Amino acid sequence: MIKRRSKQQVKHLLFLEENINIKIITVGKLKEKYLRDGVQEYVKRLGAYAHVDLIEVPDEKIPNNPSLAEETLVKSKEGRKILDHVKQNDFMILLDVASREMDSVAFSQYIEKKMIDGYSTIVFVIGGSLGHGEDVLTRADFKLSFSPMTFPHQLMRLILVEQIYRAFKIMKNETYHK
């Protein structure tokens, strides 16, 4: 059940939202037009609540049947490209299948708490097809799993941006389909 907020709490949230930046950093280009259109639609909707930056870093070429050392090198190179876009005072949420799961309401409350805690930029990171390198795993402030299932990275972008939009709708007690 979603709790109702006082007018003062809503006013405070509105102030926070005016100053919140959301960065979504992903490895690789979004190729499918229907996914690009979906992501852009939710980014447009999110514009009412936050400033959103979509950052695509180039993926590294993966050799056929890569060795563990080659996989580690690819993840390390992609990780450096990701971390080039993350500032020290950003709150970084890493999408990682083996991490904590939460429902949409808990996710909204978590984002709201980070805003109240004073974070002006929340960064979401979707890694490459091999996952995340050690440096990215170490830098993450929080690791989040949307499901124990594996989703295509391109589809995950759309799911993520929709869930961020849903989180803001929940924060503001605005209706949105369930």
Image (cartoon, rainbow, N blue to C red):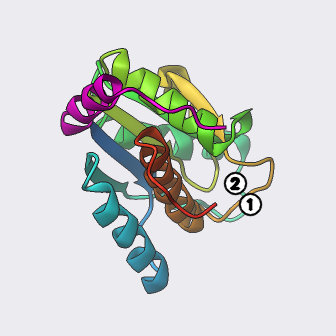
At label 2, which amino acid type do we have? Pro
Quadrant of image for the C terminus: bottom right
- Left or right of residue 115, residue 104 in this image: right
Quadrant of the rendered image containing residue 118: top left
How far apart in space, not on screen, are marks 2 and 1 (Cα)?
4 Å
In terms of secondary structure, where does tag 2 sit?
Answer: loop
Residue lying at the far right in this picture: please name it.
148
**Residue 36, x across and y down, in percent:** 40, 75
Q: Which residue is mark 2?
A: 66
Q: What are the residue bounds of the magenta stretch? A: 1-19
Nearer-the-camera pick, 15 or 39: 15
- Left or right of residue 174, residue 96 in this image: right
Residue lying at the far top in this picture: please name it.
117
In terms of secondary structure, where does tag 1 sit?
Answer: loop
In the image, residue 74 lies in the stretch drawn in magenta: no
Nearer-the-camera pick, 114 or 62: 114
**Residue 97, x across and y down, in percent:** 72, 43
Which residue is at 38% across, 37% downward? 123
In the image, residue 14 lies in the stretch drawn in magenta: yes
Q: Are marks 2 and 1 in contact (CB under 8 Å)?
A: yes
Q: Is residue 14 above or below residue 45?
A: above
**Residue 146, x across and y down, in percent:** 68, 47
Q: Is residue 3 above or below residue 157?
A: above
Q: Residues within 10 Å of mark 2 (few under 14, many from 20)?
A: few
Label ID, residue 65: 1
Assign the magenta stretch its main secondary structure.
Answer: helix
Quadrant of image for the N terminus: top right
